[in-house]
Image (spheres, rainbow, N blue to C red):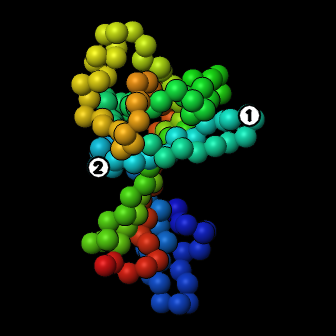
Amino acid sequence: MASVDGVSSQDDGVKAQDHVVKELDAPTCWALLRTAEVGRLAVIVAGAPDIFPVNFVVDHATVVIRTARGTKLAAAVGPTGVAFECDGYDPDVGEAWSVVLKGQIELKESLQEKIDTAELPLVPWHAGPKPCFLRVVPDTLSGRRFRTVRPPG
């Protein structure tokens, strides 16, 4: 049984099961991602990590992001790969979750690819033009769910 900090119980009245971090299987990770609208795309920019908040949609076993040309796009399509993270919180049960994908970006450039991707329910939050579609194709997918310290509500 895994725990958050390697400790199975504490003297402060917190139950041992409240320390458990549940590893999530792939279907659960994809289901959770489908409930969210915003994630974070991590890329390497000028040799240093950078993170960009993005809205996204799940399409099959990939994440699709729409963006403008610029730093994020240039870094994402580079050879180093990317990480994508999304998380959420269910206040009714006091549980949080986090899903991380690591993989490569496919830039959708052909007319047919753009038409297919443009039909996805992905509307940018920012009003500026976002003509580029990025697809995160994961090499790895991992997820965790855990009880939060704060009480529900």
Task: Locate the C terminus and report the quarter of the image it occupies.
Answer: bottom left
Crowd tier of the residue under label 2, counting other residues whose Cα lies within 10 Å: few below 14, some 14–19, many 20 or above: few
In this rendering, would 119 be left or right of 102?
Answer: left
Name the foreground residue: 103 vs 18: 103
**Disc 2 on helix, strand or loop?**
loop
Mark 1 and mark 2: Cα distance apart in space: 33 Å
What residue is at 53 percent from the left and 66 percent from the top? 3
- Residue 136 percent across, percent down from the top left: 46, 30
Can residue 136 be seen in the rendering of this structure? Answer: no
Task: Look at discs 1 and 2 and give the one toward the viewer.
Answer: 1
Q: Is the C-beta separation of discs 1 and 2 under 8 Å?
A: no
Residue 88 position within the rendered picture, expressed as x and y whole percent measured from the top left: 38, 58
Q: Residue at x 29, y 44 (%)?
A: 34
Residue 6 is drawn in which quadrant? bottom right
Label tally: 2
Q: Is residue 48 above or below residue 11?
A: above
Looking at the image, the residue that sits furthest to the right is: 47
Secondary structure under tag 1 reads loop
Which residue matches tag 1?
46
Q: Which mark is residue 145?
A: none
* Callout 2 amino acid: Thr
Amino acid identity at mark 1? Ala
Label number found at residue 35 = 2
Outermost bottom residue:
12
